[in-house]
Amino acid sequence: MTTQTDKARLFHSLHAGDRPLVLFNIWDPGSAKAVADAGARALATGSWSVAAANGYKDGEHLPLELALDNLARIVANTDLPVTVDLESGYGATAAEVGRTVQRAIEAGAVGCNLEDSHPADGRLRPLAEQVERLVQVRKAADASGVALFINARTDVFFQKPAEAHDAEMVAQALERARAYAAAGADGLFVPGLVDGTLIANLVAALPLPVNVMVGAGTPALARLAELGVARISHGPGPYLTAMRTLAEAAAKASDF
C-alpha cells in the first residue's frame, strides 16, 4: 500500500519530468475512477465541478464539510495522488486557512490549490495578506509531516479579458509568484492566461513550475509542453463534457 508520504513525493516529482503533468479534473469517486482507468498519473478535483455536481455555485458556496467528505471518498477509492481545489481556503483569516489545509491533509490530500482572490467578487487580495495565508498553509503542511504540494493560484489574468493581457500583467504575476515561493508555495497556477508568448515569458522568469488551464484560445498541449509548462489542468471542461453527453443520451432515450 502506497502511503500518503509516498504519494506526496511522487506528486512533486511529476512536476519535474520531461513532459507536463496533465490533470483531467474530477468531481467525485466515479469520475476519479474513470480518469484513473484512462491512465492518469494523478488526480485533481476542480472546485467548480464539485460544486455543480452537488447543486452549488462555485465560490465557496459548497460547504467545506461536504468538500472534505468528497475528497476523503475520492482518496479512499484510488491509489493515485490526489490534489484538492480549496478555492481561497475557506477562511477569513490566515489561521483559518491553515486549519482548512490541515483538514484536507487529514482527508488524504497531497496537494492543494489556493487562489489569491476573494471568492465573493474575484478581487485580488493584497499581496501581503495572501503571503501570510500561504505561510500558515506551509506551517500546517510541515506540521503534518506530509510534503504537501501548494499550488498557489493567482487570478491576475482574470482581472482583464484575454485580449488585454500584456507584459505588465506578467510582471504583476511574477511579483506575486516570487513572494508566494518565499512563503512556501511549490507551484504557480495562472488560469485565464492563454497567449503563448506571455506564457513563455512567465515560465522563463518564474522560480516555480507553471500550471496552465485549458480553455478557449489555449495553445495545444504539445505547444504548452514546448513552452515549458509543467502542469496542465482542464478545470470545469471534463464535467461540462460529461453533462452534455448525459443530456444528449437522455434526449435520445426520450425520443421514441
Image (spheres, grey):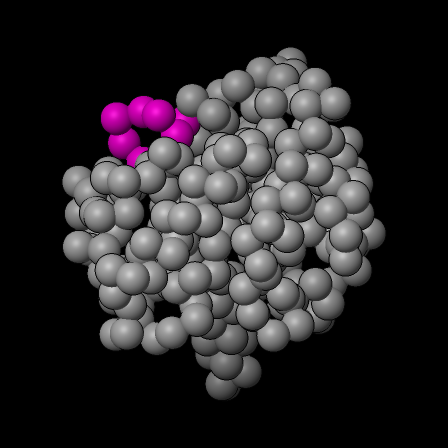
In x, y percent, where is residue 228? Answer: 24, 38
Q: Residue furthest front?
A: 128
What's the residue at 46%, 49% (across, down)? 176
Report the residue at 70% width, 29% height from top: 139
Residue 59 pos. (x, y %) = 65, 66
Type of secondary structure dominating the magenta stretch = loop
Q: 228 or 47: nearer the eye?
A: 228
Q: Position of residue 226 (x, y in %)?
A: 17, 40
Q: Give the range drawn in magenta.
A: 14-20
Q: In this view, does 207 lie above or below 143?
A: below
Residue 179 shown left or right of residue 72 in the figure: left
Does the magenta-highlighted stretch encompass residue 17?
Answer: yes
Using the image, determine if residue 125 lies above or below residue 82.
Answer: below
Up-down: is 220 above or below 117?
above
Q: Nearer the viewer, residue 7 or 53?
A: 7
Look at 56% across and 70% down and name the residue there.
122
The quarter in which the N terminus is drawn is top right
